[in-house]
Image: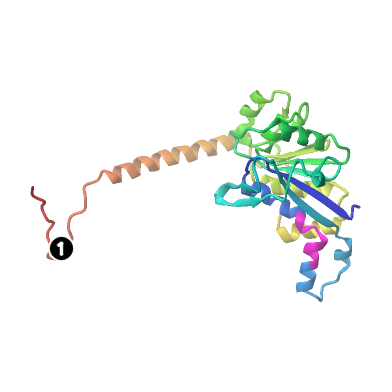
């Protein structure tokens, strides 16, 4: 078992905040976090603390992006490193997580080259969350591999990256070698839970305690509903929104309310 796990979160140009947040599930499985729990509850036995590894998380971006990385919902993530830093060079990390950016984002060749080198380094695992598949596929590290990705983007992804073997219509997450990928947003929680359970980086009791504390990892690898049901629910919400917009529009065109019977009258403006 590793005594120090180094995780790089690669965010070249912004990301979904919830995609990034799933890394905290792995951060909980650390000597630092367990230590805080045991300090708050000093009567708890400390044997789990002795089993837990040190976990370092590095937030990595591009030199062009700068220290402030935009997240959704107005949040800003502070980068700790750029990919050119020696501390996060290939061979220095155990895990590279790639959270999902805006689907219209573009990525520099140098940034993609760095990710490609990480994926080709023995012992390094790539965890791809949601639209992070766009970065990974652009780097060429998903060619010929099974991959998940957002359920609603399967057709788009298959046309743009035909060499991928997409299974995201059924799989919440999937592994192919050292490449792990998940579907939309909070499916990243299930991805990291499955990863921690499957790998030998953490002791099993530490993993299960971390998942109990974060209440993550109960959803299965496969979706409970088929792709057709998913799309029907999606279309129904569009129809409901259309009906609501029509009703709202009619209310807006209704006659203005009459003056209340308080003894006052509406005034008439004269030229």
Q: In x, y percent, where is residue 160? A: 65, 25
Q: Is residue 244 visible?
A: yes
| Residue on which the image places disc 1 | 261
Instruction: Determine the residue located farthest toward the right in the rendered image.
Output: 1
**Residue at the spot 47% in from the left edge and 38% down from the top edge:** 238
Instruction: Determine the residue located farthest toward the bottom in the rendered image.
Output: 43
**Residue at the spot 88% in from the left edge and 38% down from the top edge:** 122
Q: In x, y percent, where is residue 192? A: 75, 48
The front one of 221 and 106 is 106
Residue 45 sits in quarter:
bottom right
**Residue at the spot 50% in from the left edge and 36% down from the top edge:** 235
Look at the picture and state if 120 lies above or below 221. above
Question: Within the magenta stretch, is there residue 172?
Answer: no
Number of on-image labels: 1
Residue 62 sits in quarter:
top right
The front one of 166 and 141 is 141
The front one of 197 and 119 is 119
Question: Within the magenta stretch, is there residue 33?
Answer: yes
Q: Is residue 220 visible?
A: no
State the extent of the magenta-drawn residues as a range: 27-35
Look at the picture and state if 137 lies above or below 181. above
Look at the picture and state if 39 lies above or below 163. below
Q: In x, y percent, where is residue 117? A: 81, 34
Main secondary structure of the magenta stretch: helix
Look at the picture and state if 244 lies above or below 27. above
- 88 to the left or right of 241: right
Q: In x, y percent, where is residue 191? A: 74, 45
Label 1: which secondary element: loop
> How does the figure colour the protein chain or chains?
rainbow
Check disc 1: other Cα within 10 Å, few if <14, some if 14-19, many if 20+: few
Residue 128 sits in quarter:
top right
């Amino acid at each position: 078992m590793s005594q120090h796990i180094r995780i790089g979160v690669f965010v070249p140009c912004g990301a979904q905040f919830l995609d990034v947040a799933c890394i905290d599930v792995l951060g909980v499985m650390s000597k630092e976090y367990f230590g805080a729990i045991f300090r708050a509850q000093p009567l708890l036995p400390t044997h789990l603390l002795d089993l837990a590894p040190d976990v370092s998380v590095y937030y990595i971006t591009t030199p062009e992006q700068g220290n402030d990385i935009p997240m959704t919902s107005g949040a800003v993530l502070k980068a700790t490193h750029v990919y050119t830093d020696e501390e996060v060079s290939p061979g220095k990390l155990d895990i590279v997580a790639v959270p999902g950016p805006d689907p219209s984002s573009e990525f520099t060749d140098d940034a993609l080259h760095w990710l490609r080198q990480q994926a080709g380094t023995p012992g390094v695992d790539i965890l791809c969350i949601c639209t992070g598949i766009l970065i990974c596929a652009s780097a060429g590290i998903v060619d010929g591999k099974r991959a998940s990705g957002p359920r609603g983007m399967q057709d788009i992804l298959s046309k743009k990256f035909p060499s991928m073997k997409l299974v995201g219509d059924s799989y919440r997450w999937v592994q192919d070698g050292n490449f792990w990928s998940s579907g939309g947003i909070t499916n990243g929680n299930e991805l990291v839970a499955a990863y921690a359970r499957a790998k030998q980086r953490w002791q099993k009791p530490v993993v299960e305690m971390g998942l109990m504390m974060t209440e993550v990892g109960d959803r299965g690898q496969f979706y409970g509903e088929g792709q057709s049901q998913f799309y029907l629910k999606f279309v129904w919400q569009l129809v409901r929104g259309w009906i609501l917009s029509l009703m709202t529009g009619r209310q807006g065109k209704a006659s203005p309310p009459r003056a209340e019977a308080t003894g006052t009258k509406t005034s008439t403006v004269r030229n």
